[in-house]
């Protein structure tokens, strides 16, 4: 899978941002090939630059890079992108990423170093 990731900065006007974001979601959800959508509210900065304060992480998932690119080029993708710039006052970072996921059954098992034992 591939995803489009939007990292939203702290808004200038919270109420206006929330209304604009709702409209953005309605536009983005019309993009062809969208398979999944996740939204995370950022709780706190654990490590990093205090000057970069993200408020929200919005992820849009597609089957492939080609599907993601086609969605961005679509009429719905163009409309969502235009509105994203408008309502957020360009206070966001936008990136694409290949999405990989591991479940506990996929985790590598602990290995023991010779001479050391692990206690659980």
Image (tube, rainbow, N blue to C red):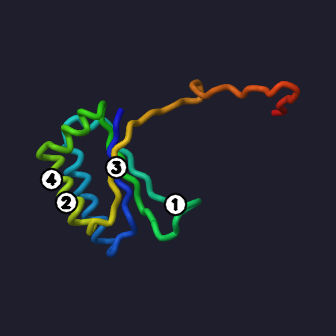
Q: Nearer the viewer, mark 4 or mark 1?
A: 4
Taking the view exactly as shown, the residue that stands out farthest to the right is 115
Q: Earlier in the sequence, mark 2 or mark 1?
A: 1
Q: Quadrant of residue 24?
A: bottom left
Task: Name the residue carrying label 2.
Answer: 83
Of callouts 1 and 3, which one flags the residue occurring earlier in the amino acid sequence? 1
Which of the two residues, 30 or 100, is positioned nearer the viewer here? Answer: 100
Q: Which residue is mark 3?
A: 95
Q: Which residue is mark 4?
A: 79
Q: Is residue 12 above or below residue 26?
A: below
10 Å neighbourhood of mark 1: few (<14), some, or many (≥20)?
few
Which residue in the protein does label 1 denote?
43
Left/right placement of residue 3 relative to residue 44 reads left
Check the image and report above or below for 85 versus 116. Answer: below
Asked whether the residues under the numbered discs 2 and 1 touch, taking CB atoms below 8 Å apart as contact, a structural biologist would say: no
- Marks 2/1: CA distance? 26 Å
In what quadrant of the picture does the N terminus appear?
Answer: top left
């Amino acid at each position: 899978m591939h995803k489009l990731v939007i990292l939203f900065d702290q808004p200038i006007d919270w109420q206006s941002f929330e209304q604009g974001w709702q409209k953005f979601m309605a536009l983005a959800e019309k993009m062809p090939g969208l398979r999944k959508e996740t939204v995370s509210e950022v709780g706190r900065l654990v490590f990093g630059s205090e000057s970069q304060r993200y408020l929200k992480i919005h992820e849009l998932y597609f089957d492939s890079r080609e599907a993601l690119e086609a969605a961005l080029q679509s009429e719905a993708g163009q409309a969502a992108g235009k509105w994203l710039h408008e309502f957020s006052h360009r206070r966001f970072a936008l990136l694409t990423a290949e999405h990989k996921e591991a479940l506990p059954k996929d985790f590598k098992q602990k290995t023991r170093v010779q001479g050391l034992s692990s206690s659980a």
